[in-house]
Amino acid sequence: MIRRGDLSLTGLFVELERDVGEPGTVHQLRMRSRDKVVRLDIEGRVARVTRSDDLLHSTLITGVGFELLAYNAESRSALDRFVSHVAKCRIEELRDDESGEYEIAGLSVETGWPLRKGERVGIEVPSPTGGSVRYEGQAVRSRRGKAGRFRTRVTLTGEAPAPTAQRAVGGIREALTDVPKPHLSGDLARFSMPTLLTLADLERTTGELRLTHGVERAIVYLCEGRVVDVEGIGDMSGAQQIGLLCGWTQGHFELFLRQVDRPDLFGIPTTALLIDLARAHDEAQRVA
């Protein structure tokens, strides 16, 4: 028996009465909307497992969080249609209850940027009858996920026109899908800056390597594996900035593969740049 759960464009959480394996296990999921109109077959990877006893039915309940694996545009489109239909059915159910009214108290919004606690947000929610309703809300908490994106809980305070919001999120689906996703991301504690630059050199990578360390941000521009430019770390030379970034042992990185139109400020291969930085670091240590 599958119990009621939560569904989004990125994941599914349900309660089951059987074991599905440890996190990382991949299952073929077959879902059907409550009105039996829309079906979805998609692979899901177990991301989280919780277990508790059902005292009423004397069974062991397993709560499972699945990461939905949409590998291509067709599967992502099918997932989008399924989630939209389920959301529409849910709103219609709320409208048809005994009171004849429904209220949305809060939403979780996924974005490519963090929202400050208390920041006002404008959110446009599609209505089941067509069109949309714009709400004003306040960010409660914002957390970074493993993919580097931010999931923010927003408490809605009422309907509001667009100008009242400090930052507008133009529709839930747009917030989930329109922000470019990195081709590679991770923690600097696991993959240091020198390691990333060496990998980029070996793969002749062209794109932007974006780094986050607390409130500090930096972008390293790569062209055919060579570091050609850097920005974001104060009033320092390019080599000094790269040297500082190589010392970051905490933080997050995102690599976006795209064309880079920047002049080459360094003029040397990445390997030579790293060797020069290591030599300068050793000399500074001896002087100290």
Image (tube, grey):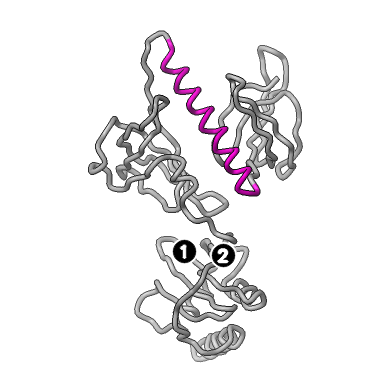
Residue range corresponding to the magenta coloring: 71-97
Label 2: element kind: loop
The relative height of residue 101 versus residue 248 in the rendered view (above or below) is above
The relative height of residue 257 versus residue 52 in the rendered view (above or below) is below
Is 29 included in the stretch rendered in magenta?
no
Q: Residue at horizontal 70%, vertical 19%?
A: 1
> Where is residue 81 drawn, in percent x and y?
55, 35
> Where is residue 148 drawn, in percent x and y?
52, 54
Q: Residue at horizontal 56%, vertical 73%?
A: 206
Is 82 included in the stretch rendered in magenta?
yes
Q: Residue at horizontal 37%, vertical 43%?
A: 170
Q: For this rendering, which residue is in front, 153 or 94?
A: 94
Q: Residue at horizontal 63%, vertical 45%?
A: 70
Q: Image check: 44 left or right of 246?
A: right
Which mark is on residue 188? Answer: 2
In which quadrant of the rendered view does residue 38 lie?
A: top right
Amino acid at pointer 2: Leu
Q: Say few, some or many: other residues with alpha carbon within 10 Å of mark 1 (under 14 / 14 to 19 / 20 or more).
A: some
Residue at the disc numbered 1 = 213
User: Is the C-beta separation of discs 1 and 2 under 8 Å?
Assistant: yes
> Where is residue 117 drawn, in percent x and y?
35, 45
Q: For this rendering, which residue is in front, 16 or 261?
A: 261
In which quadrant of the rendered view does residue 6 lie?
A: top right
Q: Image check: 137 left or right of 287?
A: left
Label 1: element kind: strand
> Where is residue 196 drawn, in percent x and y?
60, 71
Amino acid at pointer 1: His
Which mark is on residue 134? Answer: none
CA gap, disc 1 and disc 2: 9 Å
Q: Image check: 179 left or right of 199?
A: left
